[in-house]
Image (cartoon, grey):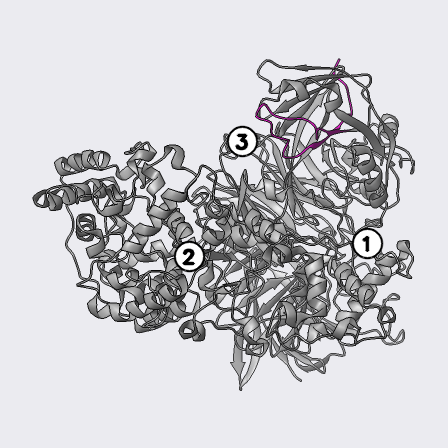
Amino acid sequence: MECMWSTPRPDVLQGHLARLCLLLGSAVGALAQSSPRVPGLLGPHPLGEQETGELLFGELGCANCHTSDLEGIGTPLTRPTAPRLDEAGGRVEPGYLARFIADPQGTQPGTRMPDVLGQLPPSQRAQVALDLTHFLVSRASRSFNSEPVSTDEAQRKLGEGLFHRVGCVACHGSGAAGPVADLAHVPAKYSPDSLSAFLFQPLHARPGGRMPDMGLDRDEAGALASYLLNGARPLVGPFQVDPQRAAAGRLHFQELGCAACHTGLGLPTTLLAQDRASLRPGRGCLVGEGPARFGLAPDQRAALEQALAGQGPEPHPSTLARSLTAFNCIACHKWGEFGGAPEPLLPHFQTTEFELGDEARLPPDLEGVGAKLTRGWLEQVLFDGASVRPYMLTRMPRYGAANLAHLPDLFEAADPAEEVTLREPKSKWKDEEWQKVARAAGRELLGNEGLACVLCHDFNSHASPGKRGLDLISSPDRLRPAWFMDFLVAPEKLRPGIVMPQSWPDGKAAHQGILDGDTRAQLEAIWLYLSLGRSAADPPGIRTQGANLEVGARVRTYRGRSNVAGFRGIAVGYPEGLSYAFNAQNGSLSALWRGEFISVNWNGQAAGNFNPKGRAVRLSEDVTFCRLEDASQDWPRAPHMNAEQPVNPDPRYARNLGYRFRGYYMGELDTPTFMYSSGSVELEDTSRVLQVEGRPVLRRELRLVAPEAETLYMRVLTGDIEEGSPTSFQTAELRVSLPTGETLLRRGRIDPEQEGEDPGKPPLELLLKLSLDEGTTTLTLDYELLH
Amino acid sequence: MNSFTRLSMIAALAALPGPAQAGSGSGPGEDLGATWGTASRERAYYRMASLTIPEDLVIEAGAFAVLPDGRVAVGTRRGDIYLMDGVDEQKPAPTFHLFATGLDEIFGLEQRAGDLYVTQSCELTRLRDTDGDSRADRFETISDEWGYANYHEYAFGSKFDPEGNIHVALGLSSSYHSRALFRGWTMRITPEGQTVPIASGMRSPGGIGANEHGALMYIESQGPWNSSCSLKVITPGAFLGHPASFNWYPFAPHLGPAPEVPDSGSRVRIESQRLPELQPYAVVFPYIRMGRSITGFCLDDTGGRFGPFENQMFLGDFSLSLVMRATTEQVDGVWQGACYPFREGLSTGILNVTFTEEGRLLTGGTNRGWPVRGLQPFALERLEWTGKMPFEIERISITPDGFRVRFTKPVDPITGGDLATYKLGTFTHIYHAGYGGPEVDQTVPEVRSVELSEDGLEATLVLDELRLGHVHEFDLIALRSRDGEALLHRDAYYTVNAVPR
């Protein structure tokens, strides 16, 4: 690939030629001597020759050996970019390691690793490389795992999709399109495990951040590894470390100065050259004669020589251009006349919101970013992986906070932000009322009766009913007010091609009905309203929804307050489409319903309350078991609370009647058994669903354990009860079948506090008298909904 | 702007009404006030990493428990408990194993002998996996001896104390009412399962646990009878300031009759001298400057792995999405101490915090229900010391005639030795039934002398007067370290209840 460096600059021409050569390169690469590649330099880039040299000086790690007064060159980018080596012996196939050390460019064309064995006689190189390999393998805590590559085609497909979608192609190219940081060596180098671990957190092995973290989760990293290895990795046998060779390797490691660039082994950095005199045109590493032979192309060498010649002690001013090239930001982002994905790669930049146009799929321009973004947001994007465009499928990589620490300052210096005084002095609204007026107006403007912004933008994590443009609530956190207002007035000017309509064409408000159509006031109002952040009330037109809990193949149990089960309510849903509610405050089965399970409110302060999805048949929410003196004694009544009497007058009512809730346990298919007691009787209460003539029936089994014989009453049903048989009773909506026993159908007591009860005709109640022997008694009741 | 201009501005803000419900439709929303403005500098010392949460999960963390194997159990407002592994990895992308689901607003989580003890709104529950399938299958009610009948009635559970008790803090039914049994009380649940009401007078607790000396404390929210958020000490028989819960003394006969109702419009200092049961605030967190809605807290037990604040309390704030520090000391039998800014810029409303096995601070929460600065509906974020020493006020302690201020790095003798560097102000709050309240009775104490320790790490200040019942505010904007650095956070606030003799 010599040809790519053989033409004198200009840059742009060279970039195009480079790409052309790369296209040819696949045919001739094996024959050509390759040189180190910096992806940002392969396409059109903003650097002149001297700056290119400065960049190379940093990227090739020259300053790791040549320190002294040369530190200014290439700063602040002169961090060691070489991989950590503590785990290299487990990450990289040992045979590959040996080949790579012996011949870096021949094994991985384009690598920045210099040939450090070139200074040795050819007869020794392979041996020294092998010694070094033994040393590295001996230092790794895990040995290289040579498991075969998965042949799961779905995995591979998933990985292929990720490779093209998340942004790998920007540096690594796709087929014949775009610049290429070649990946042909990958199958020989990694195992599925080690590549997957590397892709999951590349900054761990390569803290320099030139291979950034693409935000892959473990599954994605595994799939991508499977795609990159492509089933092609040769199997290798286990590698046995020879301690003597490892010891020799350690010596070589130090003598050859490997630790100048590579960290992780706890060995001291070995500086090989201390002064400027050691770096002179036409000598040493520059011409492939020094201890570190990079295989520089002629124009790389020329650029480096230019940088050395022009280098004073002060850092060069154009560090922003150098940073954007070194980290290849310009592979995806436009920056002035440079950058942006090249045409052949554009189809790989995708979105889930096609209607939003290119805005939704192409990363935003970097020109003017310092004036656009707040410092805090810039830092969050660069350092924390923050993002506001969930629809954009290409991901903003993470390069490591330490590597980009200098960048916010550079952006701010390049594009100073304009100061804005909010609150125009000529405004007709009084100062003290302005914020209130403005925020109400801002809300109205965003709503569907105003400028209808929320019909194309999410708001406060609530989905827009139309296009799902980025969530507006984040604007004041992210954007500087001057940029925001300029943008609103003329979106097309700051973001050419944007689909956002102009609401203030020529600065004149399209909506004259709010704030008297005063443009400046409207802009400020929107800003002030959005500045409320998460506390901002939704504009009209945004809706929030509840969530449905669904029952799968297993029984589902959910606790929460409910109108059908009180505050200590528990809903139980069965796969057969029948559900019931249990009031744990008093131990009552309080409602049954068919159909879907429950909806749960997840909005607001104390949420989590549930509502049956089907029409619930209610049962009495009062104690179910009680001791009566005789059959004529009234059933007790739970205390009532209402607006006039909000405080519970008898807060220990159920407890004073002997009731205690003990909890529940899950049986087969997670079917819950409720545990509670009534006096000294311990109960277990389990319900299952049976199909009887095609209809679901809730079969409730009660297990009562009495320490001694006693009589207990169970109130089974209340309301307009009809007796079908001595063991079957029903209301209009529910039939209950009982075991044979002593039942009592009687008029209950009038409850003066219960509205709607006919004083002349109190409701019926069905009691079951349980004469328990000492020990265990089992009862079975069937509940069948009749509607 | 000097600190006293700042004070008066904040005092004006503090008089605003309390939190409005977000999205209520009654108005556009509520302003959260200014940030500390220190997030950019903080990140050099405490870096933040976001835990990747799988797309189909909603993790509104309300409580954490670190398990013996290093996994962290997280209990959520939605009633799920997940076990997370890998929270200490360089790039934390834990697996979330669902251990239990279907519970009701979890604000307390503790593990013991393989079981999880879960404080949910309705009860304290012991969760057990009896069949070894890593799912809870037994949910035993340990205590439900409190009323739960109004939507705002949360329950916050502590960890075990050395005697094996768990303490549950029960918020009022609403800001002014206790309508269900023991709302506004602290309940002690003993190892034998007995439930004992021990203290009345809470308003809206946000977290409960031991301070760095093992004393039981809880964090109270600004509102009626509380002009600011504060840490208060819970002792048996204590009255914690809000009298709405006096109606339940007949149900706690061992505590005798209810205390006298305090005079509204007074000061806590005055009322606590008259009413022996009334607990003064141990640490006041000036409203907005130091949180608006403080929640769960934990102790730095990392042995220095989290930096120079070993054994201090770390507290989350819901509204402002930040973490603060506090230190306490007992003087003359009374607890008091100071609070300090620590780290802002978290992504959601913080409901709880815990230290991981390897000494990182895990935070989590949601921004549902109230105004919150962080924009994420929910998040789990981890703070990690970078190893770089921040220049901070490490702690402030009281002396018989002033304060001892300890720093994390040696201070420069010129600014550190200059009396003018130590800008102090004091204030207290009105103690009244109104919702929140302004800072009042401001004074400016005179710093008579300052003495720097030889190592430069400590400044001993002598003041003309220490004001009992007052927050003593420090603004050390002019101070420099020996290497010329300004303090990462210039402010600290010490609440004086007693002066050592």
Q: Position of residue A467 (x, y in %)?
A: 62, 76
Marks 2 and 3 sit apart, C-alpha to C-alpha, by: 45 Å
Is the C-beta separation of discs 2 and 3 under 8 Å? no
| Quarter of the figure with residue A155 | bottom left
Q: Chain of mark 3?
A: B
**Residue occupying image coordinates x 29% and y 63%:** A4
- Tag 2 secondary structure: loop
Say whether mark 3 and mark 2 are on the same chain. yes
Q: Visible in this render: residue A206?
A: no
Is the C-beta separation of discs 2 and 1 under 8 Å? no
Compared to A572, does B388 lie above or below? above
Marks 2 and 1 sit apart, C-alpha to C-alpha, by: 42 Å
Q: Count neighbours of disc 3 (C-alpha within 10 A) and say few if under 14, some if 14 to 19, many if 20 or more.
A: some
| Quarter of the figure with residue A359 | bottom right
Between A474 and B153, the residue placed more toward the observer is A474
Q: Which mark is residue A15?
A: none
Indicate the amino acid at tag 2: Asp
Most extreme residue toward the bottom is: A693
From the image, tell me which residue sits under label 3. Answer: B389
Indicate the amino acid at tag 3: Met
Q: Which mark is residue B133?
A: 2
